[in-house]
Amino acid sequence: MIETPVSTSEMIGIESELGAHNYDPLDVVLTRGEGVWVWDTDGNRYLDCLSAYSAVNQGHCHPEIRKAMVEQAERLSLTSRAFRNDQLPHFYDEICKLTRSSKVLPTNTGAEAVESAIKCVRKWGYEVKGVSEECAEVIVCANGFHGRTISIVSFSTDPTARKNFGPFTPGFKIVPFGDGSALENAITPNTVGFLVEPIQGEAGVIIPPKGYFKQVREICSQHNVMLIIDEIQAGLGRTGKLLAEEHEGIEADLTLVGKALAGGYYPVSAVLSNSEVLSVLRPGEHGSTFGGNPLACATARAAMRVLVEEGMIENSADQGHYLLAELAGMRTNQVKDVRGRGLMIAVEFHPEVGGARRFCEKLKDVGLLCKETHKNTLRLAPPLVITRDQVDWALENIEKVLRLD
Ligand SMILES: *Cc1c(COP(=O)(O)O)cnc(C)c1O
C-alpha cells in the first residue's frame, strides 16, 4: 500500500479527531530516533529529556537490542505459556543474576506487574501468614503512581486519575510517603504488603528522607509484611544504580521492573521476588498470553546486557551528578527547587510562574523535549547514554530558556 503524504498538521488533526483524548502531547510528530536524539516529520532534531518516562534508558533504537529483536522476530515470536520457549529460561537466569532475585513472574506492562504483585502478596497473606479470608490489606503511599487499572487507581490520591472511575477495589490503606511511623501505625495483623516507589517519579521526583527505607525495611520485617518496591521508573540505571533501593542498601521482598527492561522496543515488565511469595502461585491461578514470550525475552536480554556492559548505570550517576550541580547553579527567581538522583532530575517552579508547560513549549523550540509532571515541575530524564558534551548542550539551552523568561 502506498501512503499518500500527510502534512504534520493533518496528522495532528487526524489524531485529535479519531483518538481518545487521554493525553495532551506537545505538537511535535516524531518519526526517527537514535541515541539521545529524535527527529520530527519536518526534520528538526531534539534531545529527548523524557526517554518515554524512562523506557528508553538505553537510548533510541540501540543497535544491539534491535539486532536481538530482529533475529528473534525472524525465528519465533509467541508460543503462549501453554508451551515452553528457549528464551524464557535465559531471561529468568539473567534477570535473577542481575537483580539477585530468586523468582520471576514475567508480565507485559508495569500496571500488570503491580496487579500481579498485589494478587501474590494477598494470596501469600492467606496461605502463609494466616490472614483471615477477604481481610488482606496492602499499604501504599499518598501521591504515588503505579499505573491505571481499576485496582491501582483505587489507591491513587490523584483526583484526576480516579474521578468517575469507581466503584473501587477495597483492601488498601494510604500513608504519607517518607514517614516510617505512619507506616508502622497503619500496620495491622491483616497487612500483607507495603507497596512503594523508591523515588516518587510522577509526583515530581520526590526523594524520601535519608534512612526512610532502612526504617521501612525493618518495620516490614518485624511485622511480617512484604515490602514491594516499584522500580518500574526509578530502576534499571535511572538513578545511577541498577535499582534505586541500593542507595539505601536495602532489599525488597518483591521488586517490580518494567519500562527500560526491553529498552523501549517492547513492553516487558516483571515481578521479581523472594521465593516465598511467588511460590504461592499454582498452574491456572494467574497468567498472561504475551507474558514471557520469546520476542520479549530476547529483547529484554539484550537490553539488560547493554545497560551493564556499556556502563550506562555509571554514566547515569556521573552525568546526573554534573547536570544536577549545574542546574542548581543556574537557579533563577522562578525556580523553587532542583532535585534528583542520577539522571532522574526535577526542576520545580514557584506556583506564581504559572506552570511548567510553558517552559516545555519553549524548550521544544530550542530542541529539547521535556514534559511537565503535575503542574509546576519539569522532569529531566534523558537516555543514560548521554555524553558530557550533550549535557553541556542541554544546559546551554535550558539556561537560555530560563534566563529569557
Ligand atoms: C509507568 C509506571 C507504572 C506503570 O507502567 P505501565 O507500563 O505504564 O503500565 C507503574 N509504576 C511506576 C512507578 C511507573 O512509573
Image (tube, rainbow, N blue to C red):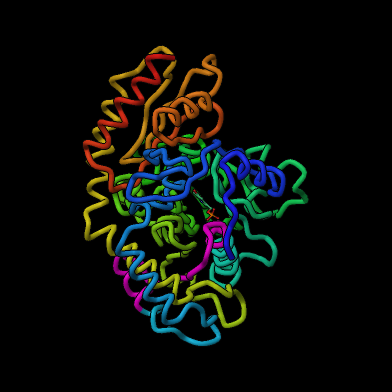
Residue 119 visible in rendering: yes
Q: Residue furthest top?
A: 333
Quadrant the N terminus occupies: bottom right
Query: Residue at the location (46% across, 25% down)?
Result: 362
Residue 218 visible in rendering: no
What secondary structure do most residues of the magenta stretch adopt? Answer: helix
Query: Residue at the location (35% across, 18% down)?
Result: 331
Instruction: Give the image location of residue 355, x and y in percent.
Output: 54, 23
Residue 101 painted magenta: yes
Residue 316 painted magenta: no
The one of 342 and 229 positioned closer to us in this rendering = 342
Query: Residue at the location (34% across, 70% down)?
Result: 68
In this figure, what is the number of numbered marks?
0
Q: Which residues are magenta?
A: 90-114
Compared with residue 92, is residue 65 higher up or lower down, i.e. above or below?
A: above
Task: Specify the quadrant of the image occupied by residue 322.
Answer: top left
Instruction: Give the image location of residue 317, x and y in percent.
Output: 25, 43
Q: Left or right of 375: which side holds 397?
A: left
The one of 57 and 183 positioned closer to us in this rendering = 57
Quadrant the C terminus occupies: top left
Query: Residue at the location (47% across, 49% down)?
Result: 31
Instruction: Give the image location of residue 125, x and y in percent.
Output: 57, 65
Q: Left or right of 350: which side holds 368?
A: left
Task: Specify the quadrant of the image occupied by residue 221.
Answer: bottom left
Instruction: Give the image location of residue 103, x and y in percent.
Output: 41, 72
